[in-house]
Structure formats: C-alpha cells, structure tokens
C-alpha cells in the first residue's frame, strides 16, 4: 500500500499551485538564467556571424595568382568558374591610362577584365555583365557618370557605361578604374579567385599548380594576409564560456532549488513520516519541476530572442538553433536535477526534519 | 505482542548521552497508552522509535514478532501508524481537506475517495466547516484537529501523538484529547506522549519514563 503514481503527480502540482509566490520566484529566477544563457548565445553568435560576413566580404578567401612581368592565361583563369569550392574567378590586365573630355588632365587607369572578376570585386554581386564600360564609384562621382550614359574615353571610341561597381571592399584602387569586359582569350596580369571558406587553403595550392602548367614561376598570394592577431571565429565559438552554460546554469538553479527545498524540509519530513519513499518524493518533485522549467525556458528564450531582435538584427535560424540547443539542454538538465533537491534535503533523521519548521 | 521493543537504547551520536536506555516494552492492538515523564526523559525519542521514524542505536523493534528492517520501515509507517505532532505538522499552504486526505493518499487511496473520508473525519472532529480553508489560516487548536482527522481517516493500527495538546489552552486540550481518544476507529491503538494528567487519565495504560528508562509501565 503506497501512493498511486497519479496521486503523487497531482500532489506535486497541488504543492506548486499552493505557493504562488514560490512558483513566481522560481519561474522568474529560472527564466532569467535560461534567457540570459540564450541571449549570450544569440549575441555572440550574431556578432561572429557579422564578423564572418564582414571578413568574407573583405576578401578573406580571395587569392591572387600572377606571374612576374605578366602573362597569365585568362582562359585558364575563367575556366575555374564552376569548379567545386570556387565562388568566382576572373582576370584583368592594365591597358594604360585614359582621360575624359569632361575632366581634362585627370588620368584614370583603364583595364581589360574578364567577366568573372567583376563577381570577385563587386561584393554586392549585382553588376550586370554586358558590353560597355564598367567604372568604379569614385570615377562615376568625379565624372558625373551613371549606368546607361555614354562615356568618351580618350584614346578610344565613345562607349556606354554598363555598370558602376562597388569595389571598395575587394579592390579599392579600382574605384577610379575604367574597366572594359573582354573575352578571356590571351594573357592577363592577374587572376583573382574567391574560394568557399573550407576550400581556401587547398585552393591556393591548387591554383599555383594550375598555372604552373602554362606559366613560368606563378605566384599565388592571399588578398588579405592573416597573422597572430587575425580573429578565428570558429575557435572563438568553440571556446565560448557560455558553451558550458548548459551545465553551469542548471547547477546554479539546482543550488537555488536546494535552498527552496531546505525551507520545506518539514513538509518533506511529514511525507516521509507517512511512509512516502524518497524516490516518491523525487517523483513529486518532478511533477512540480515540469511546468516550472518549461514555462521558465519558454519565457526566458522568447525574451532573449525579442531583446536580440530589438537591439540589433533578427537572429539567423542557425544561431537561433544554437541558442535553443544550449538553453534547452540547460532546461533538460535542470529537469533531471530539480526533483532530487527535495529528496537530498530530506536525508537523515525524519524526526529532526519534522522539528525544522 | 503486536508492537514490541526489545533492549532498545538510543543516543544521537557516539559522543552523546543515551536518551533512552534498555527499554523492553510490549504494546497491544487497540491499547490506549500514555507516555509520561519530565521534559528530557526521552518520551519523544521513544515515540519516534515506536513509530519507526528513528532507528534505535541498540536493540530491536518487532511488529507482530518480526524485527522491522530498514528496508520495510517506510511500508510499515504507511500501513501501521499515523502521527499527530506537537507542532501540528501540516502542509500550511494546502487546505484543511487536502491535509486530512494525505495519509489516505499515502496508503494508496484514490484522491476522490480520500477526500470523502477526510471530509467526514473533519466533520467528526468539529472542523468540517473549515475544510476549504488553507491550513496556515487556522488556529492552533483547529490545525491540531485537522492533523487528528488526518490520522483518524487512515484508520491505522496505532496513532502516535507527541504532546498533541502541549500548545493548547485547557478547554481545547480536552476537546482535542476527546477527538483523538474517543473518536478513534475501533481497534486502533493510541500512544500519546503527554505532560497532562487529565489526558493520561483517559488512557488505559501509563508508561512513566525517567532519564530514558521505563520506571513504571504496567497495565491497569
């Protein structure tokens, strides 16, 4: 003869309902802990995501192949497009300097480019590839040019401006260049290749080997050099302190639960005096913990997402998933630990528990 | 005999003095027993040993001739005993009815039937009109009656009462004692630790303790 399982569960719910203040306090404290953990994950995740995007747009995975004195195959460079691990590839060659009648005496660099290089240089990837002149934003501003207008290049024929590229992140010099898209046949000065992140290191070696077949002493250099001060987002994320929050947060909450159970030890003594087993006390505790932890996690997580969205940008699904997994793991561990707080406090003599009021 | 102590001694630590010493005692079914003695004579400790809340440092507790083992003590606490404590231990944020149902629930009763029986017991001890009131809002006497109703509802073999009237005025003491002693189910024994001779007078047997030893435990 002992408690029915349903009666124990109902007893746990009834104890939870009976103390609104304790319930509110535990929900608020737990929600703050779960929400704080989720917010830290969201904030660092978004900061690193922003950094990675910025780092990539800054040319972190761009390599430049060149041959001293020029003479790199444009066709071989353009043929890299579409290969696995390569985002875009293209070549350019300088064709001297030019002036415009509207700005006499001001010299601009002119260059031939293969179509692929515009995708490497223009991070917006919004430049239409077609016949006509592509110019940098500084040049467009100085000469009052925009897409669709006719530019009179000297020397050369008047030509339509087919696009104004934003080259500020990948090749700021080209902001004052007049670029003429040409066929990749022939030799070029440099071949620019943007790799996918995971393919960058191996891709640079591949690039040197690819051009060694047709050019003497090709050199491959990174567009953006890294050193010991360069941030490594992957290792920063892996070593983030709140990554251990799924253990630390429930550990702290369990301590709070122990304090709460300590103030109820005469109740535990009463249940034990009536023949309730400590395992049954734990089951009763589990029934109390479920609604508390689930509501605290839901509140805390929603609040963290709302704060992150209001404070900066909406978190990406990937970061949301990370925050949910970390804080959700903390909630699950708390669910596993909480029920034992009462049973742990109720160790020792039942008679002395009954006196502790 | 149903409840037997054999050579029971107890102290609360190796360096502590003996609180009860060498007690041999037999208590039958349905007996009304008063444990009397001055403060510190070991009444509460003896009661908690009898009710299997405390395991004696020496000696054995036997139920129906079988020694009680630690493994089965919780089961015996559920089926054989019910308690009324001096400080009216109750779940103070729960209602009187919920408190009175507890012992029955611990014995495996369904919640609905436990409430029906508990409500009847609350009526019988005179606090039926307070059934839905939270225990924390009850007076000392009312709360003690709720605890008695909790014990009576389970119809245990023995009700153990540790100075249940110790904090009550004289009139309430007599009412509570009457509820406990005369209101008990047929066949249920009561072992009551008390200082009050009027309460002891209502019992069929008085066991006197001095310095942890039984000096007089005869049946009348």
Image: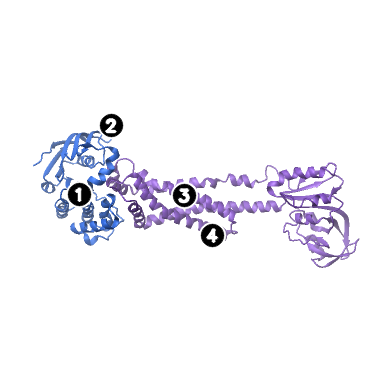
Chain colours: A purple, B blue
Instruction: Assess whether mark 4 and mark 3 are in contact (beta carbons under 8 angstroms).
Output: no
Residue at 33 percent across and 49 percent down: it is A264
Q: Give me the chain letter of mark 1.
A: B
* Tag in front: 2 or 3: 3
Circle 3 SS class: helix
Circle 1 SS class: loop
Q: Quadrant of residue B77?
A: top left
Q: Where is residue B56 in the image (x, y as percent from the top left)?
A: 25, 36
Q: Distance between the residues labelled 2 and 3?
A: 44 Å
* Tag in front: 2 or 1: 1
* Side of A105 where A52 appears, left or right: left
Circle 4 SS class: helix
At label 4, counting other C-alpha atoms closer than 10 Å, the crowd grade (few under 14, some 14-19, many 20 or more) is some
- Disc ID at residue A306: 4
Q: How far apart are marks 2 and 1 (CA)?
A: 31 Å
Residue furthest top as drawn: B15
Q: Position of residue B123 (x, y in %)?
A: 20, 59
Circle 2 SS class: loop
* Tag in front: 3 or 4: 3
Q: How far apart are marks 1 and 4 (CA)?
A: 56 Å
Q: Do labels 4 and 2 share a chain?
A: no
Q: Distance between the residues labelled 3 and 4?
A: 22 Å
Disc 3 designates what residue?
A332
- Disc ID at residue B15: 2
At label 2, counting other C-alpha atoms closer than 10 Å, the crowd grade (few under 14, some 14-19, many 20 or more) is few
Q: How far apart are marks 4 and 2 (CA)?
A: 60 Å
Residue furthest bottom as drawn: A149
- Sequence-wise first label, 2 or 1: 2
At label 1, counting other C-alpha atoms closer than 10 Å, the crowd grade (few under 14, some 14-19, many 20 or more) is many
Disc 1 designates what residue?
B164
Query: In the figure, A166 relative to A4: above or below?
Result: below
Q: Are marks 1 and 4 on the same chain?
A: no
């Amino acid at each position: 003869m002992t408690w029915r399982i349903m009666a124990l569960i109902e007893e746990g719910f009834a104890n939870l309902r009976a103390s609104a203040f304790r319930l509110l306090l535990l929900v608020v404290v737990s929600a703050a802990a779960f929400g704080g953990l989720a917010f830290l994950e969201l904030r660092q995740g978004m900061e690193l995501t922003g950094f990675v995007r910025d780092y990539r747009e800054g040319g972190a995975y761009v390599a430049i192949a060149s041959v001293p004195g020029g003479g790199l195959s444009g066709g071989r460079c353009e043929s890299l497009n579409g290969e696995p691990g390569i985002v875009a590839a293209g070549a350019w060659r300088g064709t001297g300097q030019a002036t415009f009648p509207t700005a006499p005496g001001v010299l601009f660099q002119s260059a031939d480019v293969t179509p692929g290089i515009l995708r490497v240089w223009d991070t917006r990837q919004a430049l239409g590839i077609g016949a006509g002149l592509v110019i940098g934003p500084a040049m467009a501003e100085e000469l009052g040019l925009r897409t669709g207008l006719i530019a009179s290049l000297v020397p050369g024929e008047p030509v339509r401006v087919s696009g104004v590229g934003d080259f500020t992140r990948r090749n700021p010099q080209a902001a004052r260049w007049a670029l003429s898209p040409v066929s990749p046949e022939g030799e070029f000065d440099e071949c620019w290749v943007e790799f996918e992140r995971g393919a960058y290191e191996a891709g640079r070696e591949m690039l040197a080997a690819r051009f060694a077949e047709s050019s003497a002493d090709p050199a491959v250099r990174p567009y953006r050099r890294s050193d010991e001060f360069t941030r490594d987002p992957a290792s920063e994320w892996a070593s983030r302190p709140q990554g251990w929050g799924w253990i630390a947060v429930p550990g702290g909450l369990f301590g709070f639960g122990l304090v709460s159970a300590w103030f109820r030890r005469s109740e535990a003594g009463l249940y034990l005096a009536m023949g309730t087993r400590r395992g049954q006390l734990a089951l009763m505790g589990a029934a109390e913990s479920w609604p508390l932890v689930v509501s605290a996690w839901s509140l805390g997580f929603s609040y963290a997402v709302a704060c992150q969205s209001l404070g900066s940008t909406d978190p990406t699904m990937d970061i949301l998933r990370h925050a949910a997994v970390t804080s959700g793991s903390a909630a699950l561990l708390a669910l596993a630990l909480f029920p034992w707080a009462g049973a742990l406090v109720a160790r020792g003599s039942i008679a002395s528990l009954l006196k502790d009021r | 005999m149903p409840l037997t102590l054999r050579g029971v001694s107890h102290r609360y630590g190796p360096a502590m003095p003996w609180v009860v010493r060498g007690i041999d005692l037999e208590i039958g079914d349905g007996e009304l027993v008063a444990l009397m003695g001055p403060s510190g004579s070991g009444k509460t400790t003896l009661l908690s040993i009898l009710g299997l809340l405390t395991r004696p440092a020496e000696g054995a507790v036997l139920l129906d001739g079988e020694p009680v083992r630690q493994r089965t003590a919780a089961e015996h606490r559920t089926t054989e005993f019910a308690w009324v404590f001096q400080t009216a231990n109750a779940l103070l944020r729960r209602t009187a009815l919920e408190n009175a149902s507890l012992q029955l629930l611990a014995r495996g009763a369904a919640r609905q039937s436990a409430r029906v029986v508990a409500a009847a017991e609350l009526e019988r001890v005179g606090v039926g009109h307070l059934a839905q009131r939270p225990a924390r809002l009850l007076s000392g006497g009312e709360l003690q009656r709720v605890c008695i109703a909790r014990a009576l509802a389970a119809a245990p073999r023995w009700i153990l009462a540790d100075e249940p009237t110790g904090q009550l005025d004289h009139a309430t003491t007599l009412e509570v004692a009457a509820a406990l002693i005369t209101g008990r189910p047929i066949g249920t024994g009561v072992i009551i630790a008390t200082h009050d001779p009027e309460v002891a007078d209502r019992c069929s047997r008085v066991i006197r303790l001095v310095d942890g030893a039984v000096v007089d435990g005869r049946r009348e």
